[in-house]
């Protein structure tokens, strides 16, 4: 058999053209995450660092900054990508645009100046919003609400968070808190909430509430608690659908995904019972499709929305 001759050398292949990305950052109660999100909503790289509870605010920031800088280098060296901006989401409380953040579960960060620190670190424009807002943008972009101009997103995790999209626009409100339905009252006279009132959605159906009620973590639910939580979520969803003329509620978060079909069936039954107006009857609850990439895709969605708005405001700037 004749020997196949190989050429002495081959020219180096042309590098692929750079693709634009947003560097996405998610500030959660137990971890920081960062990733690279393309203009089509694809998460092409990600990194995560666990939050150490007993260290100070600068130690937390150093862990976050190291991860962000490493991803900046990765974008250029491995993906030949151009970073167009930084998209950041955080659990609350937070001021508008994440000028300052005080994330639940991160006790050393109180009014931490996240926006200025990230902008200084990266040299890139930073666009920030609350976690639920980013998740809503992501669901409408590449998730379960694709093609829908009006919907609500609810995250049922250690705490409750929500966001509302009307006529294709994310509701922000005066301070950025519009659509956060965690503190609508679902059980009048119910459990005392951290906000000071009683019977709030967050105080009755969040992971922290479930653990307080049952003495067990949400990862070990009884059938009754899965049903009860689903009914409360459905009741809250009905209030929002009735108030905002919505036909779709996307529900995600570790509690809802962990509780599965039992939870979603109870939630839909409760929604059907309480949404009886002509425009809200037939509204449906659907699970998030984004899985564990939701937070980073959400942060990327916040970033890309900011980049595109900046382009419209400065149309003569080079791309």
Image (spheres, grey):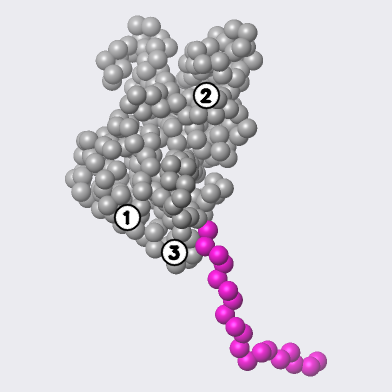
So how many labels did they put on this image?
A: 3
Crowd band around label 2 with a 10 angstrom C-alpha radius: few (<14), some (14–19), many (20+) = some
Residue 302 visible in the shown view: yes
Q: Secondary structure at mark 2?
A: strand
Q: Are marks 1 and 2 in contact (CB under 8 Å)?
A: no
Q: Where 230 sits versus 89, above or below?
A: above
Residue 88 percent across, percent down from the top left: 38, 43
Q: Secondary structure at mark 3?
A: helix
Magenta region, mostly helix, strand or loop? loop
Residue highlighted by disc 3 = 76
Specify start and end residues of the magenta stretch as a single range: 1-19
Crowd band around label 1 with a 10 angstrom C-alpha radius: few (<14), some (14–19), many (20+) = few
Residue highlighted by disc 2 = 166
* Quarter-of-image position of residue 303: top left
Residue highlighted by disc 1 = 123
Q: Would you say 15 lies left or right of 178 here?
A: right
Indicate which disc, 1 or 2, sits on the residue closer to the N terminus: 1
Crowd band around label 3 with a 10 angstrom C-alpha radius: few (<14), some (14–19), many (20+) = some
Q: Is residue 68 magenta?
A: no
Gap in angstroms between the C-alphas marked 3 and 2: 37 Å
* Quarter-of-image position of residue 139: top right
Residue found 32% across the figure and 37% down from its top: 98
Residue 3 percent across, percent down from the top left: 75, 92
Indicate which disc, 3 or 2, sits on the residue closer to the N terminus: 3
Residue found 32% across the figure and 55% down from its top: 123
């Amino acid at each position: 058999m004749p020997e196949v001759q190989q050429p002495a050398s081959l020219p180096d292949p042309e590098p692929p053209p750079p693709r634009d990305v947003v560097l996405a950052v998610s500030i959660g109660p137990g971890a920081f995450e960062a990733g690279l999100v393309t203009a089509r909503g694809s998460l092409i790289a990600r990194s995560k660092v666990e939050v150490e509870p007993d260290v100070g605010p600068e130690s937390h920031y150093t862990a976050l900054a190291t991860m962000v800088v490493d991803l900046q280098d990765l974008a250029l060296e491995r993906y030949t990508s151009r970073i167009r901006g930084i998209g950041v989401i955080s659990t609350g409380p937070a001021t508008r645009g994440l000028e300052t953040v005080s994330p639940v579960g991160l006790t050393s960060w109180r009014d931490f100046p996240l926006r200025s620190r990230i902008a200084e670190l990266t040299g890139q424009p930073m666009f920030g919003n609350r976690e639920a807002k980013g998740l809503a943008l992501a669901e409408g972009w590449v998730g379960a609400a694709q093609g829908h101009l009006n919907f609500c997103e609810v995250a049922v995790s250690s705490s409750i968070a929500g966001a509302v999209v009307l006529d294709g626009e994310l509701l922000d409100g005066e301070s950025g808190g519009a659509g956060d339905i965690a503190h609508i009252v679902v059980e009048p006279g119910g459990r005392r909430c951290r906000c000071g009132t009683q019977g709030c959605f967050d105080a009755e159906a969040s992971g922290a509430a479930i653990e307080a009620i049952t003495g067990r973590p949400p990862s070990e639910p009884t059938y009754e608690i899965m049903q009860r939580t689903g009914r409360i979520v459905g009741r809250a969803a009905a209030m929002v659908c009735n108030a905002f003329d919505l036909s779709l509620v996307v529900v995600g978060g570790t509690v809802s995904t962990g509780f599965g079909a039992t939870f979603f069936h109870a939630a839909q039954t409760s929604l059907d019972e309480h949404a009886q107006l002509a425009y809200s009857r037939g509204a449906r609850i659907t699970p998030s499709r984004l899985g564990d990439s939701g937070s980073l895709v959400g942060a990327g969605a916040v970033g890309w929305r900011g980049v595109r708005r900046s382009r419209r405001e400065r149309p003569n700037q080079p791309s």
